[in-house]
């Protein structure tokens, strides 16, 4: 039991890797994502477009994508897909 709690705690606080591809001096491409497991005690879906109900769901609230960042002096802009 104690080993399980330590393992879970380490997974929760594990350092995240930060990786970006520098396309130019002012333009970078990076990725982002999160995954989750959800289940409710209610048959009615709780969140619109997520379909979280009384069945286990691993992809209801999972998202992965790319981010393009542009930097110029004090101006910063981002686009995600």
Image: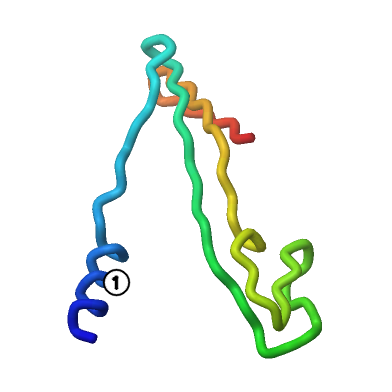
Residue 25 spot, x, y in % from top left: 37, 11
The quarter of the picture where the C terminus appears is: top right
Say how many tags the image has.
Answer: 1
Residue 64 spot, x, y in % from top left: 56, 44
Position of residue 20 relative to residue 53, above or below, is: above
Residue at left 72%, top 64%? 50
Residue at left 47%, top 24%? 29
Between 4 and 73, which is closer to the camera in this rendering?
A: 4
Label 1 neighbour load within 10 Å: few <14, some 14-19, many 20+:
few
Residue 20 spot, x, y in % from top left: 38, 27
Q: Is residue 54 left or right of residue 76?
A: right
Residue at left 80%, top 83%? 44
The quarter of the picture where the N terminus appears is: bottom left
> Which residue lies most toward the bottom here?
41
Between 26 and 33, which is closer to the camera in this rendering?
A: 33
Q: Which residue is mark 1?
A: 8
Q: Is residue 4 left or right of residue 59?
A: left
Label 1 element class: helix
The type of colouring in the image is rainbow
> Which residue lies most toward the top here?
24
Q: Is residue 45 left or right of residue 79?
A: right
Residue 21 spot, x, y in % from top left: 39, 21
Position of residue 2 relative to residue 22, above or below, is: below
> Which residue lies most toward the right here?
44
Residue at left 32%, top 37%? 18
Between 54 and 19, which is closer to the camera in this rendering?
A: 54
Q: Quadrant of residue 6?
A: bottom left
């Amino acid at each position: 039991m104690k080993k399980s709690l330590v393992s879970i705690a380490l997974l929760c606080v594990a350092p995240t890797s930060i990786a970006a591809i520098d396309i130019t001096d002012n333009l970078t491409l990076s990725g982002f994502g999160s995954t989750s497991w959800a289940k409710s005690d209610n048959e009615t879906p709780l969140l619109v477009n997520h379909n979280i109900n009384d069945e286990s769901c691993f992809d209801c609230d999972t998202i992965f994508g790319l981010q393009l960042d542009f930097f110029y002096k004090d101006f910063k802009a981002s686009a995600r897909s």
